[in-house]
Image (cartoon, helix red, strand yellow):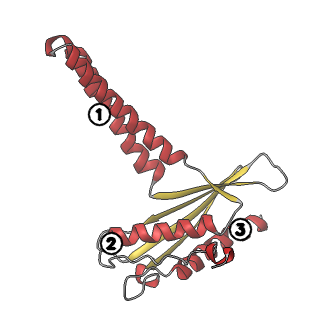
């Protein structure tokens, strides 16, 4: 075997999903969209701000719970009552903030990428991909949104998930890529027209 054959590109992995499991289908399509959006465009760099915020809120809540447990271990109940009260209230407040964050800020967003302006401009474009698929519904709604210093624009596509999956439950990446590219090009054309 030659070294060229050793370094050959691995074949694209086919993703097979139970086509009757709506949640699994949605997540598999989300992964395909994210791969297409970030894999085909080297100028887009993935940003993890939303995920990091969620992780920070969860870590704070767990930290408060651990602190309460440790304090109660070293100072039995009658002495630890104010600390336990504070910890319980802080934990539920953090869970409330986390719920608000995931409901109103994330809104089904699964990919965020930043595109630097050509020529070293100070404003960056932020691309967000989000999706929604209702329970017991086959309609997959994909929204691609771009934000820059001048405002926000978005394009939405609603298609049956059967348009992206074959009869055996295999995700057809080229069809997903066609739809993502169509939405991306529509947003890029709007940007050039303005």
Quarter that holds the C terminus: bottom right
Tell me which residue sits at (54%, 82%) in the image.
Answer: 175
The residue wearing badge 1 is: 92
Q: Position of residue 12 (x, y in %)?
A: 54, 77
Which tag, 3 or 1, sits closer to the chain's start? Answer: 1
Front position among marks 2 and 3: 2
Relative side of 148 to 101, left or right: right
Cα gap from disc 3 to disc 1, whole angstroms: 43 Å
State the residue lying farthest toward the front.
1
State the residue lying farthest toward the bottom.
167
Q: Quadrant of residue 161?
A: bottom left
**Label 2 Cα neighbours within 10 Å, binned few <14 / some 14-19 / many ≥20:** many
Reply above or below: 181 against 113: below
Cα gap from disc 1 to disc 2, whole angstroms: 31 Å
**Front-most of 107 and 84?**
84
SS class of the residue under badge 3?
helix
Which tag, 2 or 3, sits closer to the chain's start? Answer: 2
Reply above or below: 82 against 193: above
Which tag, 1 or 2, sits closer to the chain's start? Answer: 2
Q: Quadrant of residue 15?
A: bottom left
The residue wearing badge 3 is: 188
Q: Position of residue 35 (x, y in %)?
A: 55, 67
User: Mark 2 and 3 residues: CB-CB less than 8 Å, in contact?
Assistant: no
Q: Position of residue 154 (x, y in %)?
A: 59, 63
Tell me which residue sits at (75%, 48%) in the image.
Answer: 123
Reply above or below: 45 against 136: above
Relative side of 105 to 121, left or right: left
The residue wearing badge 2 is: 22
Q: Position of residue 170 (x, y in %)?
A: 42, 82
């Amino acid at each position: 075997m030659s070294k060229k054959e050793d370094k050959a590109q691995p074949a694209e992995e086919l993703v097979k999903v139970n086509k009757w499991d709506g949640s699994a289908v949605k997540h598999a399509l989300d992964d395909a969209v994210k791969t297409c959006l970030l894999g085909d465009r080297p100028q887009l760099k993935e940003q993890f701000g939303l995920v990091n915020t969620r992780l920070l809120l969860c870590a704070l809540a767990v930290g408060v719970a651990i602190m309460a447990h440790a304090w109660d271990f070293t100072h039995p109940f009658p002495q630890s009552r104010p600390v336990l009260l504070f910890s319980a209230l802080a934990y539920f407040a953090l869970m409330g903030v986390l719920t608000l964050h995931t409901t109103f800020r994330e809104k089904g967003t699964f990919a965020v990428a930043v595109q630097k302006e050509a020529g070293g401009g100070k404003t960056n474009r932020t691309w967000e991909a989000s999706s929604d698929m209702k329970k017991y519904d086959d309609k997959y709604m994909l929204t691609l949104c771009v934000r820059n210093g001048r405002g926000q624009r978005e394009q939405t596509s609603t298609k049956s998930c059967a348009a992206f999956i074959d009869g055996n439950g295999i995700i057809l990446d080229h069809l997903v890529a066609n739809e993502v590219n169509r939405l991306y090009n529509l947003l890029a054309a709007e940007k050039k027209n303005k």
